[in-house]
Amino acid sequence: MMGETQSNLGAWPEGEGPIVTETTPLLRLPEFGRIAPDVRLGIGVRLFGFVNLYGCSIGDNSKIGTFVEIQKNAEIGRNVKVSSHTFVCEGVKIEDDVFIGHNVSFINDKYPRATSESGELQTEADWQVSRTIVKRGASIGTSCTILCGVTIGEFAIVGAGSVVTRDVPPNTVVAGNPARTLRQLEGK
């Protein structure tokens, strides 16, 4: 690894670890948690305890709270705050300057099932990931569920406890189950 790093001895096998560059400032890794060697971390990323990160990318100056899981092929932009107990699954793209509240869950499978038609437990080959995008500057309140295949527009606000089942236009406040438009915001 290049650059100054601070990590837990024994956290990764010899020669493995998060990908950092020679310009990465001191990287503070949590004492407990799992950060796979294929995770890409930007400059100034802050990670807190009990995270589970694998195959994802996290942009500069982002903050990932306690008990957060971010799966493979998920993208987190720059200056993003992901609060504790949040689940970001495969296929989710979160652009720059986004706030994600506590206990937010993203869903990536439209028709989840435990078993295939043959009765066997499903594998990755048995489902299709649907892309979900959270655009720049959006805010998602605590305990929201974001269903797969939706786009949350720039600077939109999703109220706490909402279930987002369809696209949210830019500069719009939505809330409820299912989330409905409450009002428009002044454009940025």
Image: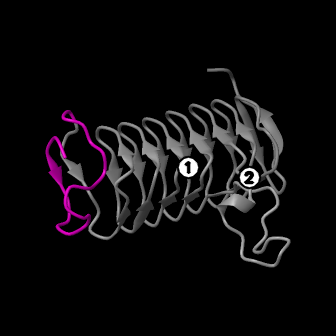
Q: Quadrant of the C terminus?
A: top right
Asked whether, in this view, residue 173 is left or right of residue 95, the answer is right
Residue tagged 1: 100
Q: Position of residue 56 (x, y in %)?
A: 47, 48
Residue 23: name its quadrant.
top left
Image label count: 2
- Mark 1 residue element: strand
Residue flagged by tag 1: what amino acid is it? Ile
Asked whether, in this view, residue 108 is left or right of residue 30, the answer is right
The residue mark sitting in front, 1 or 2, is: 2
Between 162 and 61, the residue placed more toward the observer is 61
Q: Residues within 10 Å of mark 1 (few under 14, many from 20)?
A: many
Q: Residue furthest bottom?
A: 119
Q: Residue furthest top?
A: 188
Residue tagged 2: 128
- Mark 2 residue element: loop
Between 164 and 129, the residue placed more toward the observer is 129
Asked whether, in this view, residue 175 is left or right of residue 55, the answer is right
- In this view, 62 is above or below 146: above
Q: Main secondary structure of the magenta part?
A: loop
Residue 136: name its quadrant.
top right
Q: Which residues are magenta?
A: 1-23
Between 98 and 181, the residue placed more toward the observer is 98
